[in-house]
Each structure stands twice: as structure tokens, then as C-alpha cells.
Image: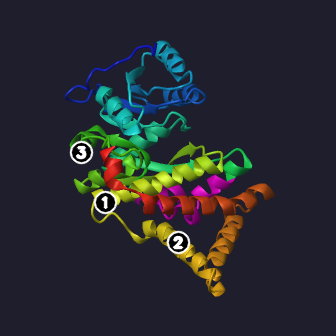
Amino acid sequence: MMGRMSSEPAPQTPTTTPGDRPLVSVVMPILDEERHLEDAVAMVLRQDWPGPLEVVLAMGPSRDRTDDVAARLAAADDRVRLVPNPTGRTPEALNAALGAARGEVVVRVDGHAEIPDDYVSTAVAVLEATGADNVGGTMDAQGRSPFERAVAAAMRSPLGVGSSRFHTGGGSGPVDTVYLGCFRRSALDRVGGYDPRFTRTQDWELNHRIRATGGTVWFTPDLVVTYRPRSGFGALARQYRDYGRWRRVVASTHDGTLNPRYLAPPAMVVGTSAATLLGLVWPPALVVPAAYLLAVAAGGVAITAGEPARTRLLAGPVLATMHWSWGWGFLTSRPRRLLGR
């Protein structure tokens, strides 16, 4: 049993209440979140937002006790509703939650996200002040183990993830994409919600369509969401390989969305691999992979200043894993196959 499961469609016009406080719908895609779900929902329910709020959990086919936790949460608070997501895929979960959401404002939160008590009120205030269609803030990566702390440092640095403000911070203003997001429901309706073909990068792709239809995506450093990184090299490599694969899918679907920043990792993979092979017959060529290894080692030490020695030693290999996995994923991506799936 998954508790009170709702499959009702959203009303034709968003629900509002007397005054100027819109109903806020917090939508959460849920799959295998037994450890984190109760805390994540509690953080949403204790928001200081002075208006009405609902939480819509889109429940995938979890293999742990996530369904039991969700059923208990829904039974304890009538602001929590559950909708089914049989495929377990994130874009379909988000669309299922949107189909049941009744709010004029839609806030996306993940099942393991950690948000401050003023997250919703701050997001709505910025949405109203800027006139944007989507507002988001900083994806604040924070690790617990030495490995996770090294990954977190890499995710907050341009050496690891480029110059996206939602990773590295910066001033407020229009951007290509943001982490999670606080949306006007009218903007989501205008673009038709999330594209269910995009297993990854569905946020970037959605924000591209919002901007392409005249909307604005706005970054503010006043919104901060704690993100917990992957806990091992294998999981990290798979994550960034998938990012690379789906970035190429986006580029093949939307002309003009590929820039030099996205080409740097695949260029590095090709260049260092070719130089290594050439070095077997002409040793001076080995200076290229050697220079790369020295650069990531030095960069890893630099971005983990003040961390324990183990974290600083792990940071270089972490950076290399992120670069190589992203680049390899991009080079081996098959957009037609991925979209067809």
C-alpha cells in the first residue's frame, strides 16, 4: 500500500486563496528514498511560507521501504499527497506530480534535498520581484566522508564543473539554467512540462524551452540547497558519464546550445589519449598526459585547501574521474538511441 494515492488532474486554473498568497505546490520525484524522505518532507512542511502549501510525492517502484514512509507521511498530514509513477523515471515523476498539483507556483524539491526554512518564501519573493518564470539558487555540495568532501569541493569549483552559477555561486541575474527551481505554473503549462524522453538533463532542457518562448530563468544566491555527493568512484563515474551523454542529446535536439565549455572534456579525452598512444613511438608526446595529471593533482590540492590530507589527495583523482567520465559519455553518446528509448 502506498497510502492516499491521487491521480486527479490539475484544475484548469490554478488554485489561489483570498489575498495575495498563492498556493505553492512542492513536487518531489521519489525513488528508493527510505533514508532521506521523512527528513526531506519535514523540511518542506516546516517552511515559513505564510500562504497555503501542498506536497505532491510522485512515487516510483522503490525497492526499499520508501512506500511505507510516504504512506505514513500522507496519513499524518493532509497537505501531503501521493501520485503513482510506474516507470520510476524522473521526468515522468515530475509530470505526474504536475498533473496533480493545484498551485499557482510550483517548487521542485528532491527526495534527499535539504532546504532551509525560508526556501519557499524566498523563492516566491524573488519570482515576484523579478518577473521571472523560474527561480533557483545554489546547489551546495557538502560531503561527510573524505571522498564525498573531495567531490563536493570539485562540484563547487570551475575546475570540476565549469562556470555555472548554480554550482560555483555568483551574483543574481538571468542564466541558462538553475538547480531544481521555483516556477510559475503558467510557464510550465506554456512549454508542456518536462520532456519525458530526457532521462538526464531534463532541467536544462526545460529551462531552454522556457527561455526560447520568451521567459526568464533567474539565479539568486539567496537560495541554497544542500546536495549530498556520490560516495564512491564508480557511482561518480556513472553520474558524470550520463551527464556527458545527455548533454550531447540536448545539443542534437536544440541547435545552438553547444558551447566551448561543453567541448572541453571530450577534447581532453581525445587529446590525451592520442598523445599517450603517440608516446609509445615518440616519447616526447607523453608530456601532454603528464601535464594533465599534474594539473588535476595541483588543482585538487588547491580546491581542498584547509581539508584533511586524505581529502586533498583524493581531489585530483576525483577531478580526473569527472572530466574523463563526462568526456567519454559525450563522445560515446547515441542521441537517437537514447531519445528513442
* Residue shown at 36% from the left, 46% from the top: 198
Using the rendered view, name the quadrant where residue 21 is placed.
top left
Which disc, if any, is residue 9? Answer: none
Residue type (three-letter) at the residue carrying disc 1:
Ser
Packing grade of label 1 (10 A; few <14, some 14-19, many >=20) is: some
Residue 321 against residue 11 in the figure, above or below: below
Q: Residues within 10 Å of mark 3 (few under 14, many from 20)?
A: some
List the single residue furthest toward the left. Answer: 12
- The disc, 2 or 1, on the residue closer to the chain's N-terminal end is 1
Q: Is residue 175 visible?
A: no
Q: Position of residue 98 (x, y in %)?
A: 32, 32
Distance between the alpha carbons at the discs numbered 2 and 1: 21 Å
Give the spatial CA distance, label 2 vs label 3: 36 Å
Image point (40%, 32%), residue name: 27
Residues drawn in magenta: 150-173
Q: Position of residue 1 (x, y in %)?
A: 46, 12
SS for callout 1? helix
Amino acid bearing label 2: Met
